[in-house]
Amino acid sequence: MSFLRLYARVLGLLAAERRLAIVLALANVAVAGLQFLEPVMFGRVIDVLTTREGAAIWAETLPLLALWGAIGLGGIAANILVALHADRLAHRRRLAAMARYFEHVLALPASFHIETHSGTLIKVMLTGADSLFGLWLGFLREHLATFVALVILIPLALWLNWRLALLLIVLACIFAVLAVVVIGRTHRSQEAVNAYHSELAARAGDALSNVMLIQSYVRLALEAKQLADLMQRLLQAQFPVLNWWATVVVLTRAASTITVLLIFVLGAWLKTQGLASVGEIVSFMGFATMLIARLEQAMNFVSSLFFEAPVLTEYFKTLDERSLVNEKPGAATLVKVKGDVAFEHVTFAYETSRAAVEDLSFAAPAGATVALVGSTGAGKTTAMGLLHRLWDPTSGRITVDGADIRDYTLDSLRRNIGVVFQESALFHRSIADNLRVGKPDATMEELTQAARLAEAHDFILRQPQGYDTLVGERGATLSGGERQRLAIARALLKNPPILILDEATSALDTLTEARVQQALKALMKGRTTFVIAHRLSTIREADLILVLDHGRIVERGRFSELVQSDGPFARLVSVQGGLGGPPPVTQPG
Ligand SMILES: Nc1ncnc2c1ncn2[C@@H]1O[C@H](COP(=O)(O)OP(=O)(O)OP(=O)(O)O)[C@@H](O)[C@H]1O
Ligand SMILES: [Mg+2]
C-alpha cells in the first residue's frame, strides 16, 4: 500500500508536464494494445491455412496480412513518439527535481543542517533524482502498458479458453505471493542498506572537507579503514536481500517455463478431446507468452520500486522537512528600518542542552553600538543568531522598531541585518563573486571601495588574478585574516541598517586590526551595531556593554563605568593587561 502511495508521489512530480506524460504513456498503451492483435492475427492466418485450399487461401489471408501490416506501422509511429520524447521528459524532470530539492534544503533552518551532514544531503539529492528518473522512464515506456495489458489480457485469455487461462492465473498468483513474501522479508534490510549508503556519503564528505586534518594527524589509514568497515556492514545487509531477490528471479523464470510446458500439454489434450482447434492453441500460446512477459515485467517493476523505495522515501522525507523558523501568513515586509532593537526576556535552548541564553533583556536604540562580551560558550553568538532568526526564542521576544521580528518576512528581516560571522564562510568562487554576495549588482567601483575600507584591496591586488582569483573551498587559499577582511567588505557592501560583528577582527594583527577598526567605526555610524569581541580594546566606545555568563547578563554599562566597578568586566580587563593591549612585560630587574 505504501509502495503505491510512494509510486503515486513519484508520478505526481511529472505534474508540471502532465499532458506530455499522459500522451506518451497512452502511446505506449497503444503499442501494447496493437501487440495483442498479433497473436489473434497469427491464429486466424493459421486457421485459414489449415482449413482452406487453393485461391481461397489467398483471398482470405491477404486482407488479414494487410491489416497486420497497418497495425505494425501504427506501432512504429507510436514507438517513435515515445523514443523521441520520453527520455527528454525524464531528463528535464530529473533536473527539476534536483533544483526543487536544492532550493528547499537551502531554506531549511540551521537546526536541520546541524543534524544532517551535507554529504548525506548531496547523496539524497543525486540518488533521489536518479531513482525518480528511472521510475519515470519505466512509467513512460512500460509500466502503464504492462498494467493495462494485464487488465485486458487475463479476461481475454479466459474468454479464449478458460481451461488454459486458469494456468496463467495460477502463475500470476504465484508471482504475487512471491513478491509479498520477499518484500516482507527484505524491506527492513534494504532500508538499512540505504541508511548505510547515507552514512557512507556523510563520512566521505566529512573526510573530504577535513583533508588537512586527516593528513596532519596521519589518519589516512584509519579513515580508510573506517570507511571500509562501513562498506563491509553495508554489504552484510545487502547480500541477504540480493539472495532473496535472486531467488525470486529464478522462481519466476522457472514458474513461467513450467506454465508454458503445461499449456502445451493441456492444449494437446484439449485438441485430442476436440475442445480446441490448432489455431486456437497457437493464438493462446501467443497470448500466454505475452502475458508471461508482462507478468515478469510487473515483477521487475515491483522489484525496482522495492529497491528504490528507501532512496525515494529519504528524498521525500527531506522535501517534507519544514522550517521551525516559520513565516507568519501575511507577515509584513520590513522596509525603512530605523534600527531600534530590543530583547525582552529572551530565552533559548538548543534541542538537547540547557538554555544557551536565558532571560536576556536589553535595548539597543537606533544607531547605538552594543558590545557582547563574556567567556567562550557564554551564548553571544547564539543571542545574535536569534536576532537574524537562525532560531526562534523558546520564550520572550525580540523586536525591531517596536515589532516582534516574527511579524516580518524572513527575507526582509535578514536583508536588513548584516553579519560578519565568527568563521568567515566563503564560496569556492572568485573574490569578486564572494564580495557580491552582499550586493549582487555591485559595480567594480563599489567592490573596490568596500575592499579598501576593509583593508582588503591591497592583498586582493596581490592575488594572481586580483578580484577574479578563485579562493578555493571555504577560502582555503587565503589566510584567516584575509578571509575575515573579505567578510567585512562583504558586509560593508550589503550596507544594512543593523550590523552584527561576531569576532570580526579577531584574526587580524594589531596594526591591521586598528586600521580595520577605523573603517568599522565609520561604518557603524548611523547603524545599530552589535559587536562581539574577546579583545576588549575594540569595544571601548560602545554605548552599552553586556557581560554574559552562562547565557545570562551578569553586568551591563559603559566601558568607563565597568572598569571602575569591581565586577566581572573589570576582572576580564585586568587579565588582558588593563586596556586590552598586550599583557605587561615584566622589566628585567
Ligand atoms: N548548534 C548548537 N547546538 C547545540 N548547542 C550549541 C549549538 N551552538 C552552540 N551551542 C552551545 O550553546 C552555548 C553557547 O554557544 P555560543 O556559540 O553562543 O557561545 P559564544 O558565547 O558565542 O562562544 P565563543 O566566544 O566561543 O564564540 C555553548 O555551550 C555551545 O556549546
Ligand atoms: Mg561565538
Image: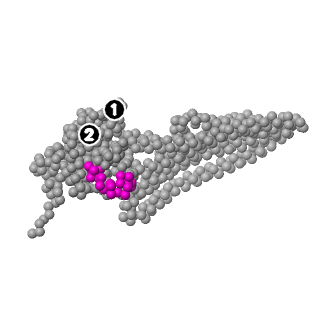
290 or 76, which lies in front?
Answer: 76
Which residue: 39% across, 60% down?
A: 211
Position in image of residue 177 (x %, y %): 61, 43
Q: Quadrant of residue 400?
A: top left
Residue shown at the point (42%, 57%) measured from the top left = 208
Residue type at tag 1: Ala
Q: Is residue 118 visible?
A: yes
Give the residue displayed 61% in from the left and 37% down from the top: 24
Of 583 and 231, the residue lying toward us: 583
**Any part of residue 552 in sight:** no
Tag 1 residue = 331
**Residue 455 lies in magenta, yes or no?**
yes
Magenta stretch, residue numbers: 451-472
Label 2: state its secondary structure.
Answer: loop
Q: Amino acid at mark 2?
A: Pro
Task: Residue at the far top: name it.
Answer: 330
Q: Is mark 1 within 8 Å of ligand 1?
A: no
Which of the two marks, 1 or 2, is nearer to us in this view?
Answer: 2
On residue 230, the disc is none
Classify 10 Å Cα crowding around label 1: few (below 14), some (14-19), many (20 and above).
Answer: some
Q: How is the image coloured?
A: one colour
Residue 96, percent from left and from top: 49, 41
* Residue of label 2: 497
- Asked if residue 363 lies left or right of residue 311, the reply is left
